Each structure stands twice: as C-alpha cells, then as structure tokens.
Amino acid sequence: MIGRLRKILSNFFQGAEDDISIGIYGPPNAGKSTLSNQISMDLTGEEMSNVSEVPHETRAVEKKEKVAIESEDGRSIDINLLDMPGITTNVDFKDFKEHGMEEDDAKGRAKEATKGIVEAVKYLDDVDACLVIFDSTEDPYTQVNVTIIGNLEAKDIPILVLANKTDLEDADPDRVRDAFPQHPVLEISAKEGENIDKLYEEIIERLS
Amino acid sequence: MAEEGSTGVTIEFLSKTKLQDKSFDEKVETVIGKVKDNAVLVLEEGWSPEEERHLIENAMEEIDEDFPGIEFLGLTERNSRIHKAKRMFYEKVMNEKYREGITIVGNSRVMERVKKERDAVSFLAKLEEEEE
C-alpha cells in the first residue's frame, strides 16, 4: 500500500509520462466503452472506443493519455484512461453468429476477444487505480467479478465500483452494494451522463 | 470424458491429497485437459484470486472452435477477519498456501445457469446437443 501510494505521489509530482493509469474493468456489455467515451468526450472532446450491442466490441485495451480531471474546488490530476476488454471465462463464436455475423467473422472476433481478455488480465499488474463497472440490471456477484475484485484487493489497488445503467427501469444498484460491501459504490448512467461529475470528484478525492 | 455411447457428464472429485503434490501449473494443465473432454472437476481446495486469474488466462489461450472456454466457481471465504488471519498464519508461519474451500471448473458448454452466492454455488450440467 505504501509502495503504491509512493508511486502515485511520485507520478503526481513528476508528471510527464508517469501519469496515473486508471483501468475501467467489468464484464462484457457493462458499459465500459460508453463510460470511456463519456469521460473522453467530456474532457478532451474526442471519443476513444467503439460501442456495440454485440459483446466484445472492445478487443484490445484502448488508451487515452493525459486526460485532465478537475474538481469544483480547483484540484486537478492528469490520468491515463484505459478502456479494458470485458473479462469473461468463455468466448463462443456461436454467440456472435446469433447476432447475425458470418461464421468466419464470428470466429475471428472470438479469437481477437480471447487475446483482448488476456491483455486486460495482464494489465491488472500495471494500473494504479480502477473503476469497476457493473450493469445494475444484472447480478454482479459472479465468479469473474469476484476474481477481478480479489486481484485488485490483493495488490491494494484503489477501487471505485460503479453501478451503471441506472436510467433503466429494472436497475437495482443496491444489488451491487450488497455484492461488494467492502467498496464504495457510485450510481451512474454512462449513457445519459448521470453522476459523471460526481465520479470526477471521487477520483480526485481518492487519488490526489 | 464420458464413455463412447454414453450421454452423461463426468463429475470428477479431486481430493486435497491428490492435489497437494502438484504444482499450480500442473493443476491448471490437468484441469483444462479434463474440462476440454467435458468433465466437471470438483477440487477439494480453494484457489487465490491470482490463481483464478491464471486459470482464466490459460483457458483463453486454449479456446478454439471446439472449446469455448470454462465456467468456474470458488467457494472460499476471503473477506472475513478470521479468513485473513488464517491465511496470514498459513503463509507467514507455516510457509504454505491457505487452501480452505472448494473449486469447481467445467466446460462452459456443459455448465449452465451458474449461480454464485457467498456460501453456496449451483449450476446445471448439460451436454451440448449434437448438431445436425
């Protein structure tokens, strides 16, 4: 913990290429890329990821460097934002065919998705902090989610859990709170931009 | 894994005695090999988050047209104070991995409706239907 804090402080004062890296983790279709785009558009005027209803649209880690976040009281930090491929334990090309893809395209997408998942898992060693995002309409207490959070906890990486898709009628953010009571949970709608300002405040509060 | 002509799912239980002499890499290799043959394995030991992560990585590297990956479930208490104290005792004093719990791993085409709770897990074991 002290080592990580020292690195964060060191990065903070050195600036340049050692900005704080924040990874956005979560299962497929939780809204990682929608959130990445919301933040990136808001703070840099540019999108950073493609968004799709078909799972595994993000099949490689997407990076946006030197994103400056400012709080209302004037504090600011520069971060490197990392949109991670959704982590899962299985990728079946047949699932993509059900979304209307041709067999060869589906197989290619599955191959790329598995590589992306391995890349995202390896990045667990390199991020300084994480936003772990869940779809509030789904059960968040799955083995993969428990494993991701467990790895971050083992490395003392600061975590902010996001209960996303609160704009949907059957959203139940309390289920996310109940699943991971050891971590702070912020309710957001990445699609509608709800509570994104509060997210910036939370990031600055925890990392600066 | 199931015998020729049979339609069931083999569920294989591996005791901690059988597992204790294997390195973690050997365990993962054994598990993935059996799971690819449609077995569901029940291991009499809990795995750490780091080990579970290596299982995911290894499973991803094995995925192809015939093997879509795995489902796995760990039944291990991680966040209670007692668990943390036990884990620290095993690792700092006894210099060995704390392995209380069980781990279940299966082919994702066999394990369906996987449900995890803090103190219980369940799944439906199903054989893939033959394609015509």
Image: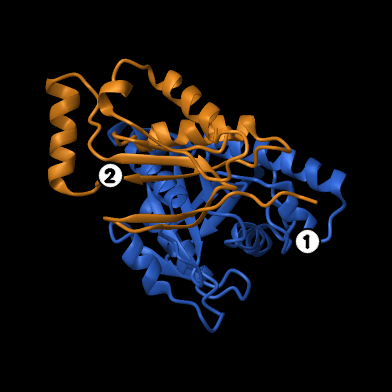
Chain colours: A blue, B orange
Q: Nearer the viewer, residue B39 or A119?
A: B39
Q: Amino acid at mark 1?
A: His
Query: In the rendered image of this protein, does residue A113 appear above or below residue A204?
Result: above
Query: In the rendered image of this protein, does residue A123 appear above or below residue A79?
Result: above
Label 2 sits on residue: B76
Q: Chain of mark 1?
A: A
Q: If the image is split into quadrants, where does the N terminus of chain B sit? A: top right
SS at mark 1 in the image? loop
| Residue A173 lies in quadrant | bottom left
Query: In the rendered image of this protein, does residue A170 appear above or below residue A19?
Result: below
| Residue B33 lies in quadrant | top right
Mark 2–mark 1 distance (CA, rounded to whole Å):
36 Å
* Position in image of residue B131 (x %, y %): 76, 50
Q: Chain of mark 2?
A: B
Residue positioned 27% across, 27% down in the render: B16
Q: Quick check: can you spot residue A195?
A: yes
Label 1 sits on residue: A99
Outermost residue, bottom direction? Answer: A169
Q: Quick check: can you spot residue A125?
A: no
Horizontal arrangement in the rendering, residue A180 relative to residue A18 (left or right)? left
Residue positioned 63% across, 72% down in the render: A191
Horizontal arrangement in the rendering, residue B89 relative to residue A121 (left or right)? left
Outermost residue, front direction? Answer: B5
- Mark seen at residue B126: none
Q: Amino acid at mark 2?
A: Thr
